[in-house]
Amino acid sequence: MHDVAAEAVKFIDLNLTTIGFLFIVGFIGGLVSGFIGSGGAFVLTPGMMSLGVPGAVAVASNMCHKFPKALVGAYKRFKYGQVDIKLGLVMAASAGVGVQVGIKIQEWILARWGEAGSNLYVSLSFVVVLVVVGGYVFWDAWRTQKSGGAEVVTSLARRLQKIHLPPMMYFKTADVRISMWFTLPIGFATGMLAATIAVGGFIGVPGMIYVLGASSLVSSATELVIAFVMGFGGTVKWAMHGMVDIRLTLIILAGSLLGVQLGAIGTTYVKEHMIKIVMGTIMLIVAVSRGLAVPKYLKQLGVIAPSDTAISVLSMVSFATMCIALGIGAVIILGSMWRAKRAEAAKAPEYALKESYG
Amino acid sequence: MLTLSKEAGAMSDSKKTFPEPGQPARAAGAKPFTLVAAGTPKETEGKAGEVKRKILVVAKHHAFTSGVLDYAANLAARLNYDLLALNVKPELEPGGKVFSPFNRHLREKFRRQSQASLEQVRPVLASHGIGCEQVVKFEGVAKAVMDLSHLIKRVDFVITDQGITDEEITGEIPLPVFSIAGYQGEKVMAKWTEVQDWSRMRAIGKTVAYGLGAAALYAAVFLNGDTVMRYFTRGGWYAALPIATVFIVSFVHGAFAHHLWSVLGIEAVKKVQPRPEVAKRPVARRRPRPQLRLDT
């Protein structure tokens, strides 16, 4: 999040294309969010900026839609028994700290290397985190699918759970008993990443799965709680600066509230490792997208000197790739929901011959 | 081999009464109260004065699946048992949420349909010496079976029809309970969808109501775009305006979206959430209580 300038802020005029674009992207973003716990919003900020919305307004309006969407998604998944509220709140606490630290780092880089340097920092963070974490998540999901679809708690998580370091906490829904100290770095990293690339869940969800030992289902659902808390806090700050364009927010919400519920429903249809597959896929493609944007910032810093047309082509491809990432995620989610629904309808009613005593 | 599903042109007598829920099935000392048509070749009693053992067949529908009824009837014929047909509809329990007079009408209808459905097969049962009492109850499956097993003696075991889950039947009934495997059930009579239609209509109504509410809210914001933007971006305490708006819209539009997906048939599958495999302590299991039955 960048410092807010005190100049007059321009709010764009709305037309049918703008409205349609925001609604559709909101819907797909919500769908992905409802399914993997995070990740829908990151297309919206650059998307809004490409429509001419000033950066700060884009970030503020995005955040203002994020927290109610997360609330609705969390509520729905809570009814399915997937949300661990305690875990969410504990992580949100350390995430809050992480957000503040992340903002401070951003401000320092901005002061030191200017806008280009800041953008470069953001893009490089994107690429590193997404490639490393996304790659691992994807590989793990692939492995789970090959081995028949049963999720296993990692050995790292098991070892950490055995370490007795008070205060120990028991998270009922996640069925995890672990020292509070191990939740801190994950929450902190979630907050920092949220402040940097606007998506904290890309570290939060894998962190909960691989470090704490919660299931994909519970992790992605609990992430929505963290997203709500962070989003609400951030929105209050932005709204107090008058940066929220409520019209944009409402249009995006119109789509994303539909999508997030569909995504939440989808998690009950598909096998659990599907969540990892979708998350890994999106993360890897977005990493490519952000990687393509790096040369632009390198040029602005004077490190390399490609031609202007090359830069604009790369920018377009970068943006398109990001949209494709989201689109592919949505296709995978809807596709697996469709297949699961068909398989269920086709099953003949079978009853095992069984005997039970009162 | 007794098959009830292909019964053609069954003759059935005019309406018979059958035990109201809660009333004893027979007066003391009287012959067993059965609903078999007059002129049955065989008596439904075994030895003089002795009451035949019974198989309780229970369904959550007014009609029994033919496969289940076949099985029960065959078993009854071989063991020389009678059948006790129990039709339950827990949704119509008196004192429930559905509007009361309509509820009463639905109960009457369920009784009539259950009776009519069994009338079709009763003659065939009778011709094999299988008596069949019928009881209709409007309470949960387990409670209905329990009550009946207290009221009517010599119910030896229970066979459940399609759609009755384990949770509904176990834990409270001191009788063995069986469900039948491996066949595609067909209903003897057409499915009754009236109650389902009613709740579907309500769901559609809710969707439309919330949709209109959401549309109204959006119209309010966008038709007054300039005023709204002027106040909402003032900053400071005015920050409460966009935040409150967003909460309200989320509530209304969120409810609309929820009902919309529901009405379109896209709902969550209720299954047990899988947990990653971690060593778990073994759960203490309830042991079946041995039952001692004495021939009196």
Image: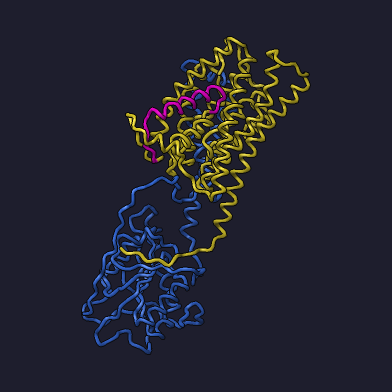
Boundaries of the magenta span:
A175-199
Q: Residue at x 52, y 30 (%)?
A: A203
Question: In this view of the protein, which residue sits in the foreground, B43 or B172?
Answer: B172
Residue A312 x, y percent position in the rendering: 74, 23
Q: Is residue B234 visible?
A: no
Does A215 sit left or right of A135 as displayed? left
> Which residue: 33% across, 52% down?
B283
The chain letter corresponding to blue is B
Relative horizontal placement of residue A146, taking residue A18 as reference (left or right): left
**Going 34% across and 79% down the picture, which residue do you hit?**
B82
Magenta-span inclusion, residue A193: yes
Q: Could you tell whether B223 is left or right of B152 in the image? A: right
Q: Tell me: residue A85, above or below residue A127.
A: below
Q: Colour of chain A?
A: yellow
What secondary structure characterizes most of the magenta part? helix
Quarter of the picture holding the C terminus of chain A: bottom left
Mark yes or no: residue A326 visible: yes
Q: Does the magenta stretch include residue A92?
A: no
Q: In this view, does B14 lie to the left or right of B31?
A: right
